[in-house]
Image (cartoon, grey):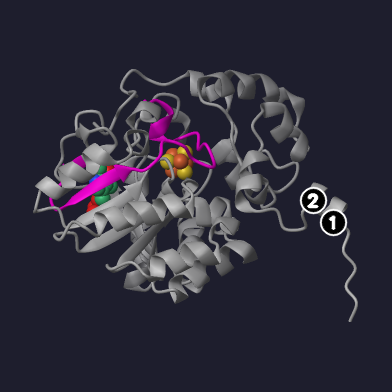
């Protein structure tokens, strides 16, 4: 069989652009986001104001799952700045969860017994409007910026640390080669028993889940838990489900954490659909977080009474293992506090 190739056009328009190219092409202006979804121009001013505080960033792969013209789309709401961002009560803070206080060495948070959180990089593929990171100076805090040296030393010196959580930002924004180097250094520390990865990339940029990445995680010397971040069943399109399933079949325990967000997933049907769709993709619900009260996010708040009503309905409708744990993070608390 003769296969004809057109080298030049393939270079200009790759049929399957790799993840780094997709990341580079991510939407990063209010104008481009409104245009891509045919949204009304009235939204522009609020979007521009919010964009100046915390810039818009969203990969096309995620935008493609939004409904054109729908200003209430649950995926759009997570990334489009609204005028409301300028109006947060005083108790909405810059560092609501006390991360600065628990930062032991650059890029390492040791808040809870037995486990540490490594800020592998400060960057994310998507900027979620409700994220506590919008106010946190993570760029100067990433462990990669210090070549991980101080963070690795700290872990090595604390024999009671048994689990390392690669987080961020999004650790999968590092190249696989860097991740491999990091895990090789961690493997020198005998008291580490478990590795965990907190990432939203399988959801927002599923092509990041390459064969090379899976080959890396498959040969790790510890059991691996992957905690993804998906807030709504509509985020789970075929490519995303495929990425999640491939990772599970490569041996990772797949879990999900989400944030309870007004106008996004604040109903029992939305939560029930999410839990069931996740399970079909091989992922178990882990945490459902009450909103961290970070400046600019007040319009997303669902209060704990409303949250408890939703949880009661979920318990009625779903198998026990499909019900996430509702938690609130409180600065200084020794674990994420269950909201019962
Ligand atoms: C959330 C978090 C963890 C992990 O907590 P688990 O309850 O084990 O999921 C660890 N360290 C920090 C700093 C965290 O914020
Ligand atoms: S992916 Fe996670 S860390 Fe990144 S902006 Fe969204 S909520 Fe924040």
Q: Report the residue at 39% width, 74% height from top.
A: 251
Q: Are marks 1 and 2 in contact (CB under 8 Å)?
A: yes
Magenta stretch prevailing secondary structure: loop
Q: Position of residue 273 (x, y in %)?
A: 51, 63
Graded by Cα atoms within 10 Å as few (under 14), some (14 to 19) or many (20 or more), the crowding at tag 2 reads: few
Q: Is residue 275 above or below residue 10?
A: below
With 64 as the anchor, is 55 left or right in this view?
Answer: left
Graded by Cα atoms within 10 Å as few (under 14), some (14 to 19) or many (20 or more), the crowding at tag 1 reads: few
Q: Is residue 42 above or below residue 211?
A: above
Whether the magenta-drawn stretch holds residue 114 is answered as yes
Q: Report the residue at 59% width, 18% height from top.
A: 49
Tell which of 130 and 141 is nearer to you: 141
With 17 as the anchor, is 206 left or right in this view?
Answer: left
Q: Report the residue at 40% width, 24% height from top.
A: 295
Whether the magenta-drawn stretch holds residue 324 is answered as no
Q: Report the residue at 48% width, 62% height from top.
A: 213
Work out whether residue 340 can be spotted. Answer: no
Q: Which residues are magenta?
A: 110-137
Q: Position of residue 291 (x, y in %)?
A: 37, 39
Q: Which mark is residue 7?
A: 1
Q: Secondary structure at mark 2?
A: helix
Q: Secondary structure at mark 1?
A: helix
Tell which of 308 and 65 is nearer to you: 65
For ligand 2, give the image quadrant: top left
Distance Cα–Cα, label 1 vs label 2 = 6 Å
Work out whether residue 17 can be spotted. Answer: yes
Q: Is residue 268 above or below residue 154?
A: below
Circle 2 residue: 11
Residue positioned most to the bottom: 1
């Amino acid at each position: 069989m003769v296969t004809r190739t057109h080298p030049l056009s393939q270079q200009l328009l790759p049929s399957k652009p790799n993840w780094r190219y997709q990341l580079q092409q991510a939407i990063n202006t209010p104008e481009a986001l409104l245009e891509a979804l045919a949204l009304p121009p009235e939204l522009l001013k609020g979007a521009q104001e919010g964009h100046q505080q915390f810039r818009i960033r969203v990969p096309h792969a995620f935008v493609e799952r939004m409904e054109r013209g729908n200003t209430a789309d649950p995926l759009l709401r997570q990334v489009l700045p609204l005028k409301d961002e300028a109006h947060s009560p005083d108790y909405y803070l810059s560092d609501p969860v006390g991360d600065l206080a628990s930062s032991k060495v650059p890029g390492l948070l040791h808040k809870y017994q037995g486990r540490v959180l490594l800020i592998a990089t400060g960057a994310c593929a998507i900027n979620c409007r409700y994220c506590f990171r919008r106010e946190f100076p993570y760029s100067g805090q990433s462990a990669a910026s210090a070549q991980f040296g101080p963070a690795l030393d700290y872990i090595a010196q604390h024999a009671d640390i048994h689990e390392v959580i690669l987080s961020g930002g999004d650790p999968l924004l590092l190249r696989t080669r860097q991740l491999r180097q990091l895990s090789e250094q961690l493997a020198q520390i005998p008291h580490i028993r478990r590795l965990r990865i907190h990432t939203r990339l399988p959801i927002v940029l599923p092509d990041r889940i390459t064969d090379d990445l899976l080959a890396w995680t498959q040969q790790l010397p510890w059991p691996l838990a992957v905690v993804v971040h998906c807030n709504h069943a509509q985020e789970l399109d075929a490519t995303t489900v495929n990425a999640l399933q491939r990772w599970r079949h490569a041996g990772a325990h797949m879990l999900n954490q989400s944030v309870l967000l007004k106008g996004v997933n604040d109903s029992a049907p939305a939560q029930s659909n999410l839990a069931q769709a996740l399970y079909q993709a091989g992922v178990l619900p882990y945490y459902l977080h009450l909103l961290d009260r970070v400046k600019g996010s007040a319009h997303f708040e669902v209060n704990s009474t409303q949250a408890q009503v939703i949880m009661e309905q979920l318990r009625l409708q779903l198998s026990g293992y499909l019900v996430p744990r509702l938690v609130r993070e409180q600065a200084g608390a020794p674990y994420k506090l269950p909201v019962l």
